[in-house]
Image (spheres, helix red, strand yellow):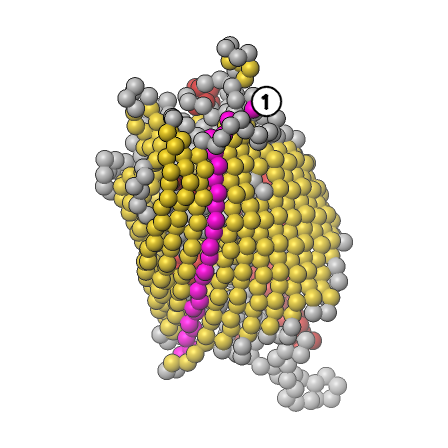
């Protein structure tokens, strides 16, 4: 028999929904024989599905009922979701699943381009050099900053402060604790929300099966003072199961003045009342203290990308997420789940963010003999969300169909205090002199029933229509001081809107499918867009909500465990798009202006192919040698307004990642190339500007190499990121952690060690 760890990996890597006769025909290779024997043995030992039919002497034959083994179809690091899972419909949608344990990557700092790099077209904003390591992501030419265009989840529930009002991701779980990442593009809006960018769901590890406890201890040392400690414990006791981790990371940072400390913790407790009823409780925590070295001008970056002209900028963003759930399997045909999540978090800034952006140095004021007072911002976030989901399997005609329905109810409260005059010191001091320049309280109330139905039109074709009805209420109360005038704000906005969509999927054979979908999308004006951040930008008070739709058509197939292909075309219409443009005031000074710029269309192709050459020619070899290509071409342009024909800001035309992976027994190594073509910082597509958000973002190519060796309960991991020390940047910003250009990290190395007890 194969070792248990390999069998578990195989279990997650394949699924079978075939008759016993068909399975018998397929069981002509050793690995699949082991898998079937192990699965049958497990089911028989627990008394599930096994039934005696005949007895022959002492070695009696047991005939079993038909068994369905369900998992995530994948060759190595990437696969796709099933038609339905946990009451959620995925049929006809473009989905990806990344199994984190199969990837060689720097998980100690959540290196996004290594971990998520196989996702075609994934645009990543890299801000580690400025002390802020929660790199944002986006697809299809959308804005990647803090993943604001994505619905970011952990174990199926929201972890951002307010999915509509303040959808910025400051917390994601450490990758050392994540077993897989699920992405759903485009039509995800029907069941999860109205985001244009879809859903990213981080699934944490579960309690190890069959043991009262299992402890993992991991430590990683790296360049620029990186030291990361990760410890976890989990196990089962009778009907109870538990899992918890604690991570603590410190680093000096790639640039001066970018030191940080971060502590993440997580705990979940689950109780199984019966085979049909399971309940659990989860808690996530983040505590950090981050120094931000500020942004750069183009000339500063060209002279020295490691330069820092700010030594007094600080950020902290404590995050707390409490979640409870109950899952009920009410018979064979119906299941129901209830998830409640409560986010109580915040963000505080003290920084030097004056007129002129990074070009104005932070020096002694000759009139006072002191440094200029800093600016202080404070934000407090509270939100509560309940999601009720039900799934019904029913027969209509000769086929079994699936109805997935539910409702989301959420309320969020957000307080923003800003413009306070801080101290002239350099430490993390949030004290202010006098009153706040502005003070706002925002609320969001959202109620959204939804339904999708999988109609099976024969054995190979499915049709999945869906609808989501949204009620959204926003309020804004507070004041702002404009020069000597205090302007009060008291606004309430209510709206109802309907999102509709449909998907189709045709499976000519089990591991091959043609899929297509179209779905409406929506993005309301959020809190951060309603108020300027710092003094370098202004906002349009009459901004409208953005609306549009997503469409996909694609083909995916896999052959045994050596070939995986997924190629698709997409079309995204984004109307009333909110963005930044550069204007001039009466004195000729440039400033950023946030408004509804125009409509935009994003269209292109996304392709992923992975080929395990070694397994292709010899299924039984202990060696593995695979090549993968992840390529996306995106043409994102404005189709109306003064910038018609211009490229959408931050939208790179080509994102190409290519790599090779070699494995042998416990050894693995990966070399990965990452190419992202050029982009622009604003809708005007200017190449040079004094405004920190505007300007050219050049193309760049980065290489990463990493490896691991596992022996028994021990593992060693090492690698080099940005192998050839490429100087590049991915973001221009008028706010934190800038303003200005935010350089990406140069060459760095890491070495880690872990043990399981």
Residue 214 placement, left or right of 306 = right
Q: Is residue 370 above or below residue 128?
A: above
Quadrant for the N terminus, please: bottom right
Residue 523 left/right relative to 616 = left
Q: Residue at x 53, y 62 (%)?
A: 339
At horizontal 58% and vertical 25% (from top left) the residue drawn is 257
Occupied quadrant, residue 23: bottom right
The residue depicted at 66 percent of the width and 45 percent of the height is 247
Could you tell me if residue 232 is visible in this image? Answer: yes
Residue range (magenta): 399-423
Horizontal arrangement in the rendering, residue 234 relative to residue 690 (left or right): right
- Left or right: 418 with respect to 482? right
**Residue at which label 1 appears:** 425
The quadrant where residue 470 appears: bottom left
Dividing the picture into quarters, in which one does residue 595 lie? top left
| Residue 336: percent from left, percent from top | 51, 71
């Amino acid at each position: 028999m194969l070792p248990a760890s390999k069998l578990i990996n195989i279990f997650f890597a394949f699924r079978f929904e075939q008759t016993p006769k068909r399975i018998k025909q397929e069981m002509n290779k050793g690995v699949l024989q082991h898998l079937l024997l192990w699965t049958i043995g497990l089911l028989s030992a627990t008394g599930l599905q096994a039934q005696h039919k005949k007895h022959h002497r002492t070695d009696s034959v047991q005939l079993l009922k038909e068994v369905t083994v369900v998992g995530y179809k994948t060759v190595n690091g990437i696969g796709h979701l099933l038609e339905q899972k946990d009451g959620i419909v995925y049929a006809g949608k473009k989905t990806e699943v990344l199994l984190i344990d199969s990837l060689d990557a720097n998980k100690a700092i959540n290196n996004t381009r290594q971990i998520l790099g196989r996702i075609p077209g994934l645009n990543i904003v890299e801000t580690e050099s400025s002390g802020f390591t929660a790199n944002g992501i986006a697809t299809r030419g959308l804005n990647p900053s803090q993943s604001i265009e994505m619905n970011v989840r952990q174990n199926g529930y929201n972890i951002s402060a307010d999915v509509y009002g303040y959808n910025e991701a400051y917390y994601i779980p450490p990758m050392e604790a994540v077993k897989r990442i699920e992405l759903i593009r485009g039509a995800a809006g029907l069941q999860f929300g109205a985001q244009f960018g879809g859903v990213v769901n981080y699934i944490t590890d579960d309690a190890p099966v069959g043991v009262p406890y299992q402890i993992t201890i991991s430590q990683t040392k790296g360049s620029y003072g990186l030291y990361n400690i990760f410890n976890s414990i989990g196990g089962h006791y009778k009907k109870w199961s538990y899992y918890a981790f604690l991570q603590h990371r410190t680093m000096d940072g790639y640039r001066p003045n970018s030191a940080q400390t971060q502590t993440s913790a997580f705990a979940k407790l689950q109780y199984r009342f019966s085979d049909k009823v399971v309940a659990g409780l989860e808690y996530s925590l983040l505590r950090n203290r981050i120094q931000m070295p500020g942004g750069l001008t183009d000339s500063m970056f060209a002279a020295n990308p490691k330069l820092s002209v700010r030594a007094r900028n600080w950020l902290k963003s404590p995050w707390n997420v409490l979640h409870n759930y109950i899952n009920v399997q009410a018979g064979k045909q119906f299941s129901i789940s209830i998830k409640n999540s409560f986010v109580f978090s915040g963000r505080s800034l003290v920084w030097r963010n004056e007129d002129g952006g990074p070009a104005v140095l932070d020096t002694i004021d000759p009139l006072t003999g002191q440094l200029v007072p800093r600016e202080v911002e404070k934000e407090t976030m509270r939100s509560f969300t309940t999601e009720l989901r039900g799934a019904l399997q029913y027969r209509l005609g000769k086929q079994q169909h699936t109805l997935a329905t539910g409702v989301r109810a959420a309320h969020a409260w957000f307080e923003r205090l800003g413009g306070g005059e801080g101290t002239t010191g350099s430490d993390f001091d949030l004290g202010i002199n006098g009153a706040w320049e502005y003070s706002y309280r925002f609320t969001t109330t959202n109620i959204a029933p939804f339904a999708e139905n999988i109609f099976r039109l024969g054995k190979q074709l499915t049709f999945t229509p869906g609808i989501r009805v949204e009620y959204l209420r926003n309020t804004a109360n507070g004041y702002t001081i404009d020069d000597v005038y205090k302007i009060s704000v008291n606004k309430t906005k209510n709206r109802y809107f309907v999102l509709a969509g449909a998907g189709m999927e045709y499976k000519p054979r089990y591991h091959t499918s043609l899929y297509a979908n179209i779905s409406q999308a929506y993005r309301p004006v959020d809190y951060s867009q309603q108020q300027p951040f710092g003094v370098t930008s202004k906002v349009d008070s009459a901004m409208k909500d953005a609306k549009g739709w997503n469409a996909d058509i694609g083909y995916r197939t896999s052959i045994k465990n050596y070939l995986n292909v997924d190629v698709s075309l997409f079309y995204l219409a984004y109307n009333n798009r909110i963005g930044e443009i550069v204007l001039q005031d009466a004195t000729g000074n440039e400033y950023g202006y946030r408004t509804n710029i125009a409509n935009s269309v994003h269209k292109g192709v996304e392709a992923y192919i992975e080929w395990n050459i070694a397994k292709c020619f010899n299924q039984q070899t202990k060696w593995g040698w695979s090549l993968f290509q992840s390529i996306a071409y995106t043409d994102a342009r404005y189709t109306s307004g003064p910038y018609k024909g211009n490229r959408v800001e931050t939208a790179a035309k080509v994102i190409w990642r290519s790599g090779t992976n070699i494995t042998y027994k416990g050894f693995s190594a990966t070399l990965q190339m990452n190419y992202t073509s050029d982009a622009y910082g604003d809708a005007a597509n200017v190449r040079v500007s004094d405004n920190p958000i505007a300007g050219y973002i050049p193309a760049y190519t980065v290489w990463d190499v990493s490896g691991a060796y596992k022996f028994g309960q021990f593992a060693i991991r090492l690698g080099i990121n940005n192998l050839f020390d490429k100087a590049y940047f991915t973001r221009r910003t008028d706010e934190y952690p800038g303003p200005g250009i935010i350089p990406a990290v140069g060459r760095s190395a890491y070495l880690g060690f872990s043990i399981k007890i």
